[in-house]
Every structure is written in structure tokens, then in C-alpha cells.
Image (cartoon, rainbow, N blue to C red):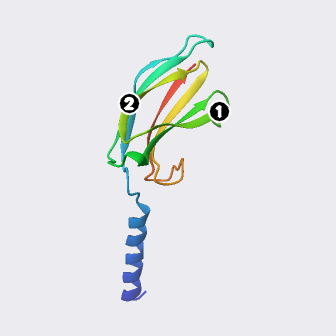
Amino acid sequence: MSKTQSLILFFVAVAALTFAMPASAQSGSIGVSSVSCPADFNTLGNANLFWSTDSMVQDTVVIWVYAYSTGIAPDASNVWASAHSGSGSAPWLQKGHSYVFVLYDSSGPAPDYTPGRFLNSVSIQCQ
């Protein structure tokens, strides 16, 4: 390989890495401050969560919640929050369900788990 070809290959690699990195959030954390799972199937429980990212762009960080009762695939999934940081309540927890709250950079297709977009997650089980 000639010196010119090596140089071109180097610049192509640098450009690919530059364009592959998302413009918004790069890291984040999500946690649970309290959980109250229901004692029976006729009541609802509550969870309080908090999250933060290094993004300054409000609209590019969202939290999806996935609800599982049986099987591998989620029974339901929805956007639960959209903010670069904050806290919130999930007052609809049900006995026999598991929930996964996924914090991710939504500047790509939703939900996109490619590196750089997935930021963090937390799980709650109400068995």
C-alpha cells in the first residue's frame, strides 16, 4: 500500500468515526429512589425514578419503559419521559410484571440500541 493510499484510508477512518458519534447525549445514569409493588392483582404500585445525562439538548434524551408479564417480548412499550435530566413517578406498577426503564439518546430511530445511543437502564420486578 502506498503512502498516499494509507493517508486516504486514515482520513476515511477518522471521518467515519466523527460522523458515527451522536451529537447529543454521550452518557447518563438512571436510578430508582423508591418502589412500592402492589400486594395483590387489584391494586397498583408506584416507583420513583431519577435520571441525568451530559446532554444540554432537552429533546434528544428519552426514557422508554418496557413492561413484561410473561415471555421474552414486552407486553407494552412507551416513551415514559423526555428530558436530559429529572425525576418522575410510575404509579401504574402491577403485581406479576417486570419493568425496564431505558435511558437513551433519541437523535436516531426509536428505540435505537446502537453504541452511543443507549445510555443506561434500570429494572423493577413486582412479583
Distance from the alpha carbon under mark 2 to that under mark 1:
24 Å
Please tell me whether residue 41 is drawn above or below residue 9 in the rendered image: above
Q: Quadrant of the C terminus?
A: top right
Q: Secondary structure at mark 2?
A: strand
Please tell me whether residue 85 is drawn above or below residue 99 in the rendered image: below
Please report the residue visible at 36 percent of the width from the left and 82 percent of the height from the top.
7
Please report the residue visible at 54 percent of the width from the left and 48 percent of the height from the top.
110
Q: Is residue 5 visible?
A: yes
Q: Is residue 50 visible?
A: no
In this picture, residue 102 sits left or right of residue 96: left
Amino acid carrying label 1: it is Asp
Rendering coords of residue 1 (x, y %):
43, 86
- Please give the label number shown on residue 87: 2
Q: Which residue is mark 1?
A: 75
Amino acid carrying label 2: it is Ser
Label 1 CA crowd tier, 10 Å (few <14, some 14–19, many 20+): few
